Amino acid sequence: MSSQVNIDQIKIDVTSDPKKFYYDNLEIFKTDPKSLNQEQLNYIYYGNNYVDHGFKRGDFMTDLGEVTKFSDRNISFKKATEILEKAKILYQKNPLQKELLLDLQKLHYKIKEEDKGDFHFSQYQLLLKTINNSGTEKLYFSPLVVTNFQIKWLH
């Protein structure tokens, strides 16, 4: 069931009480993401734009590019382990980055940690569900709020 996300209210709530509306939910996302309801997922996904992450997004994306370029390659166990350590550092900075979640899934699979890979894929799927559930259902392509230019339409 879709409902239009109230970005203005999320911004107000997250900036006035980031612990309650963002960080507490983010910690749950990192340990038991399926226990979050749609409203909590909306707060962490869309509220992500209104918190200070303590790093520059441009630098993060550059570091992510270094991880991503290896996640699709046929690399050795040793190299996958090395790249996975870099990905884990990025995950601590921003566990909501969808491309990173897919990279973590692939890297965990390369080192035979399928359960951890499945966990990150389930996080990715929840974020996509959050985006899909944010439209108005009035148009064939429901309007979606873009928090990253890689996700524009999900059809």
Image: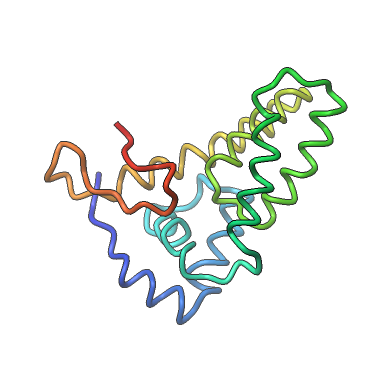
Q: Residue furthest left?
A: 138
Residue at left 78%, top 21%?
Answer: 75
Residue at left 69%, top 50%?
Answer: 90
Q: Nearer the viewer, residue 29 or 66?
A: 66
Residue 118 position by quadrant? top right
Q: Is residue 77 left or right of residue 107?
A: right
Residue 123 position by quadrant? top right
Q: Position of residue 93 (x, y in %)?
A: 66, 57
Q: Is residue 39 left or right of residue 51?
A: left
Q: Quadrant of the C terminus?
A: top left
Q: Position of residue 71 (x, y in %)?
A: 67, 29
| Figure check: 17 above or below 44 | below
Q: Is residue 90 left or right of residue 85?
A: left
Q: Residue furthest top?
A: 74
Residue at left 63%, top 34%?
Answer: 103
Q: Nearer the viewer, residue 42 or 57?
A: 57
Q: Is residue 83 left or right of residue 42?
A: right
